[in-house]
Amino acid sequence: MKSPAFGIDISDRSIELVSLIAKKGLPVVDRHARMEVPAGIINRGVIADHETLVDMLCRLFEAAAGGRRAGIRLGFSLSETSVFSRNFVFPESLSKENAEKAMLNEAIDTMPIPFAGVVADSWESRPSAGARRYFFTVTQRENAAAWQAVFTAAGIVPSFFDCESLA
């Protein structure tokens, strides 16, 4: 990675930010910052105080990255009470388009979330032994939109989301 990649883990109680850089071709932690979240700002993964959370994110990036937010790559983790995830393995011959359809169909049958109005994301790891491996996450669109609004207000553009317990 030429420039740092950032990851942010947000729970009801804390926000943690980490930046990764490449050293000898391997990702290593460059910087880390943590901030406690006062009670009532986030409740079970749902934003209760948008303005305070935006301010906290700005201060966290100031501490960890000198305020730099434009053009960074950021993955963010949401509370496991609002995001569901699963690993999938498919034959290498299955196209990405068909794999995405299969993941969504399986998720509808097995994940405890109403699928009307959801947003899903998946990441494909390196194929191995004739298989394609995917990490799949899903949350309510309303939840994702609220978090997107907070990040946008803080000048952050997230690349993907995942579940906090897997961050």
Image (spheres, rainbow, N blue to C red):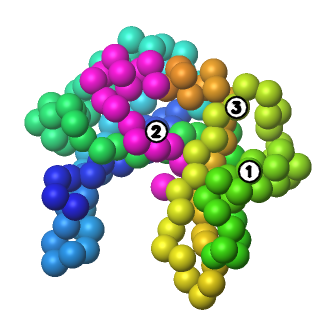
Residue that numbered label 2 is attached to: 10
Q: Viewer-nearest of labels 1 and 3?
A: 1
Would you call the spot at circle 1 few (<14 residues within 10 Å), some (14-19), or many (20 or more)? few
- Residue 20 placement: quadrant: bottom left
Is residue 83 in view? no
Q: Please give the label number shown on residue 126.
A: none
Q: Is residue 1 above or below residue 63?
A: below
Q: Residue furthest left?
A: 66
x and y, in percent, of residue 59 in the image: 23, 27
Amino acid, disc 3: Val
User: Does 63 sit left or right of 128 as displayed?
Assistant: left
Label 1 secondary element:
helix
Residue at 53 percent across and 33 percent down: it is 12
* The stretch drawn in magenta includes residue 161: yes
Residue at 58 percent across and 40 percent down: it is 79
From the viewer's side, name the closer residue of 87 and 11.
87
* The stretch drawn in magenta includes residue 150: yes
Would you call the spot at circle 2 few (<14 residues within 10 Å), some (14-19), or many (20 or more)? many
- Residue 78 placement: quadrant: top right
Q: Earlier in the sequence, mark 3 or mark 2?
A: 2
Residue that numbered label 1 is attached to: 101
From the viewer's side, name the closer residue of 45 and 114.
114
User: Does 85 sit left or right of 56 as displayed?
Assistant: right
x and y, in percent, of residue 158 in the image: 39, 37
x and y, in percent, of residue 120 in the image: 63, 41
Q: CA distance from mark 1 to mark 3?
A: 14 Å
Q: CA distance from mark 1 to mark 2?
A: 29 Å
Which stretch appears magenta?
148-167
